[in-house]
Structures are given as C-alpha cells and as structure tokens.
Amino acid sequence: MKPADFIRHAGGPVKIARALGLRSHTSVLKWTAIPVKHVAKLESEFGIPREKLRPDIFCHSTHKGEAA
C-alpha cells in the first residue's frame, strides 16, 4: 500500500502521528514507504494487515507451513 493511500484510509497524517506517538504529522507526510518499525502498531490501530501495508516485506503464503 502506498503511504498516500494509507494516510487517506486512516483518516489523515495527524491521526497516524498520534497513534504512533510521533511529535509531528510532518514525518508521516514524508514517508516514501511505510516504515517497517511502525507496521505492527499501524496494523493494530487501523486494522490493515501488514501484508497490505508492506507487501514487499510481508508476503502472504498460500501454503500451510511454508516460510515467507
């Protein structure tokens, strides 16, 4: 998911910054990709699976027991 799409879906950069405990929403606006260090928190807060937030890092395996 592109940062701009996530920001729009989540309700804006201020809401994301507050959820992450960031001092400013400006850093959220500068994202070229959603930072991996924030993926777990964003998944928890906004209900979007990490596979959608960062499909380049977290891929969904279609076979049980297969490592990603």
Image: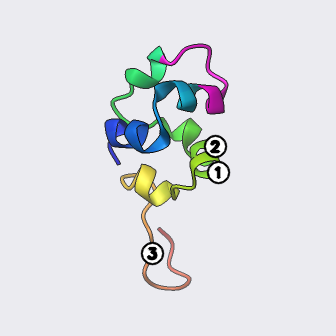
Q: Position of residue 61 (x, y in %)?
A: 45, 75
Write the residue at 56% across / 30% down. 15
Q: Residue tagged by mark 3?
A: 61
Q: Identify which amino acid the numbered label 2 is placed on.
A: Lys
The reply to whether the magenta stretch includes residue 5 is no
Q: Residues within 10 Å of mark 3 (few under 14, many from 20)?
A: few
Q: Nearer the viewer, mark 3 or mark 2?
A: 2
Q: Is residue 41 left or right of residue 59?
A: right
In three-dimensional space, the C-alpha distance between marks 3 and 2, rounded to whole angstroms, equals: 22 Å
Q: Position of residue 66 (x, y in %)?
A: 50, 79
Write the residue at 42% across / 36% down. 7
Q: Identify which amino acid the numbered label 1 is placed on.
A: Ser
In the displayed structure, 40 sits above or below 24; it is below
Q: Residues within 10 Å of mark 1 (few under 14, many from 20)?
A: few
The disc placed on residue 41 is: 2
Q: Position of residue 4 (x, y in %)?
A: 33, 36
Q: Residues within 10 Å of mark 2 (few under 14, many from 20)?
A: some
In the displayed structure, 67 sits above or below 20; it is below
The reply to whether the magenta stretch includes residue 20 is yes
Q: Is residue 26 left or right of residue 20?
A: left
Q: Residue tagged by mark 1?
A: 44
Q: Sequence order check: which comes first, mark 3 or mark 1?
A: 1
Q: Nearer the viewer, mark 3 or mark 1?
A: 1
The image quarter in which residue 65 lies: bottom right
Identify which residue, 27 or 57, lies in the foreground. Answer: 27
Tell me the SS state at disc 1.
helix
Point out the stretch of residues depicted in magenta. 18-25
Tag 1–tag 2 contact (CB < 8 Å)? yes
The image quarter in which residue 41 lies: top right
Q: Position of residue 49 (x, y in %)?
A: 51, 59
